[in-house]
């Protein structure tokens, strides 16, 4: 078995063990020290695997499997940094679990798709902005789901202790909107760079494809949510619904379109 495959299984195991520990009932908010060490080790080795798989000498290879693996790595890295300030029990385990699947995906679906024009500065700027926006809004969507579950427990009379270390809902909501604001700004910049450098990035003028349509729709949903929050004080279940809806649109724009075209249609 190649070293790449062995390393991928090893990293997936690190993520899976960390996820199990962090999701286990009664685990402290940040988890034990050894789980944090495993998570950090997984992030570092996963970065090396991505460097070999995505950033190859001829071009950037960013088909469906590599895109999911890269997004998973960025998400778990961003969350690991975010959790240093505001640990959120429940989310870190799910993020680590997603990363465990993401690191194995290039083995199941080998990615030989080179991205045209990936050597250009415009493409690299657009790629970094897009991935960061995607990951921040992914974490925001996970947090929205967690808030919804926590709120239902409280409304049904369940003790807050059933989710140990969980901050108050107002704190969760504040962090949620900070994530959405950061993700929305990056998404705006990503869309703007895509329009501005369209010919440099894609080799043609900007056109309204299904990918562009869903990306713009996601941007509009998150923009409306932030406007509603600022003007009318939107919060609670309404904010959760809009957050999840916006992320689903973004999912359809990028990963969803790649899955349909590359995995189902083999194009």
Image (cartoon, rainbow, N blue to C red):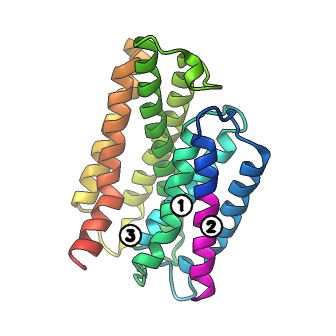
Q: Are marks 2 and 1 in contact (CB under 8 Å)?
A: yes
Report how far apart the C-alphas of labels 2 and 1 lie in the structure: 7 Å
Q: Which residue is mark 3?
A: 64
Count of picture labels = 3
Real-space Cα separation, disc 1 to disc 3, in angstroms: 16 Å
At a point 59% along the width and 88% down the height, the residue shown is: 2
Tell me what residue is drawn at x 61 percent, y 45 percent.
79
Relative to 146, residue 43 above or below: below
Residue behind mark 2: 11
One can see residue 50 in this view: no
Q: Residues within 10 Å of mark 1 (few under 14, many from 20)?
A: many
Tell me: 199 left or right of 59. left
Rendered location of residue 213, percent (x, y): 24, 52
Q: Secondary structure at mark 1?
A: helix
**Magenta residues, as a range?**
1-15
| Residue where numbered disc 1 is placed | 100
C-alpha span from label 3 to label 2: 20 Å
Residue under the point 60% across and 25% down: 166
- Could you say where residue 152 lies in the image, as x and y percent from the top left? 40, 20
User: Which residue corresponds to the image point at 64% horizontal and 68% vertical from the top-left?
Assistant: 47
Q: Which mark is residue 181?
A: none
Horizontal side, residue 180 vs residue 6: left or right: left
Q: Is residue 246 left or right of residue 81?
A: left
Q: Are marks 3 and 2 in contact (CB under 8 Å)?
A: no
Q: Earlier in the sequence, mark 3 or mark 2?
A: 2
- The chief SS type of the magenta part is helix
Q: Is residue 163 magenta?
A: no
Q: Position of residue 226 (x, y in %)?
A: 41, 27
Asked if the residue at tag 3 contacts the one at tag 1, i.e. Cβ–Cβ closer than 8 Å, the answer is no
């Amino acid at each position: 078995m190649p070293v790449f495959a062995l390393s991928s299984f090893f990293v997936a195991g690190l993520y899976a063990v960390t996820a199990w520990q962090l999701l286990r009932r009664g685990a402290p908010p940040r988890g034990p020290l050894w789980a944090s060490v495993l998570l950090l080790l997984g992030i570092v080795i996963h970065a090396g695997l991505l460097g070999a798989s995505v950033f190859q000498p001829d071009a950037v290879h960013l088909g469906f499997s590599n895109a999911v693996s890269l997004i998973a790595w960025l998400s778990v890295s961003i969350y690991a940094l975010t959790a240093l300030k505001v640990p959120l029990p429940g989310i870190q385990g799910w993020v680590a679990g997603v990363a465990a699947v993401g690191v194995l995906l290039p083995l199941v679906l080998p990615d030989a798709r080179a991205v045209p024009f990936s050597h250009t500065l415009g493409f690299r700027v657009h790629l970094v902005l897009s991935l960061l926006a995607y990951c921040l809004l992914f974490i925001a969507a996970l947090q929205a789901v967690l808030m919804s579950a926590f709120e239902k427990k409280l409304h049904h009379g369940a003790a807050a202790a059933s989710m140990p270390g969980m901050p108050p809902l107002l704190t969760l909501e504040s962090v949620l909107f900070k994530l959405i604001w950061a993700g929305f700004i990056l998404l705006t910049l990503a869309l703007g760079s895509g329009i501005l450098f369209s010919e440099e990035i894609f080799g043609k003028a900007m056109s309204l494809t299904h990918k562009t349509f869903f990306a713009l729709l996601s941007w509009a949903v998150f923009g409306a949510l932030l406007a509603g929050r600022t003007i009318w004080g939107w919060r609670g279940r309404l904010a959760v619904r809009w957050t999840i809806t916006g992320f689903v649109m973004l999912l359809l724009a990028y990963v969803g379109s790649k899955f349909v075209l590359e995995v189902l249609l083999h194009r």
